[in-house]
Image (cartoon, grey):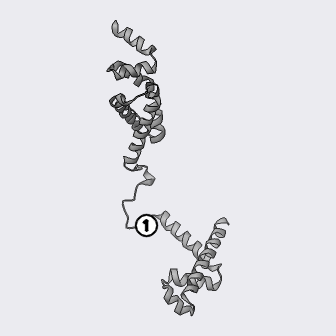
Amino acid sequence: MDAILEKISLQKATNRQLVLAAQQGNNSAFGELANRFEQMVYTVCRQRLRDYAEAQEVTQDVLIKAFEKLHQLREPLAFAGWLRSIAVRQAINRSTRRPPTVSVEPHRLDRSDTRHAAPSDVVLQRERSDQLHAGLDRLASLDRSTLVAFYLNGRSILEMSDEFAAPVGTIKRRLHVARKRLAQELECLQAV
């Protein structure tokens, strides 16, 4: 009967009274605090972690840490904020320490046969190549020949300087300008 009366009186106690009682060793008082604030702690953890099970686990860790460190709390009225700060720190710690999430969706799994390109990869590569060549065709001959020499034929800046009879700085400028013009042409082609 005393346990029922104690439970009723704990439920009517203020948070300050419960903190003071828990700091003096009353485990039931801390249990009541945990009941009152568990949902708040869970919500904080869930917002940070975005995972139901992990948020539940961290919530339990936060309550245990709060129980262990309760003697460090100097102002009993600050219990809610103090507990929230522990929850935020624990959730941040968990999110930075967890391994990256591995997707098990079928379309995200690597192919087991890597000897042959997937048909979709072949189509995409062909489309990119066609777009690139269409963009190159729309450029002026100097821009096109500069880009082709450097990127497709693999010539160095020095080799291009000799081939085009132009200083190295001029070749660099031509490459820079030609890349920008090609990017503009590719944007125009994609917009169509």
Q: Is residue 2 left or right of residue 48?
A: left
Residue at 41% in and 15% down: 10
Q: Quadrant of the N terminus?
A: top left
Q: Is residue 116 above or below residue 179?
A: above
Residue at 46% in and 18% down: 14
Residue at 39% in and 13% down: 7
- Estimate the x, y position of residue 118 in percent, counting from the top left: 45, 64
- Estimate the x, y position of residue 15 in percent, counting from the top left: 45, 21
Q: Quadrant of the C terminus?
A: bottom right
Residue assigned mark 1 = 117
Query: Regarding mark 1 in the picture, which secondary structure is present there?
Result: loop
**Foreground of the two, 41 or 144:** 41
Residue 89 figure quarter: top left
**Foreground of the two, 150 or 114:** 150
Q: Is residue 50 above or below residue 111?
A: above
- Total marks shown come to 1
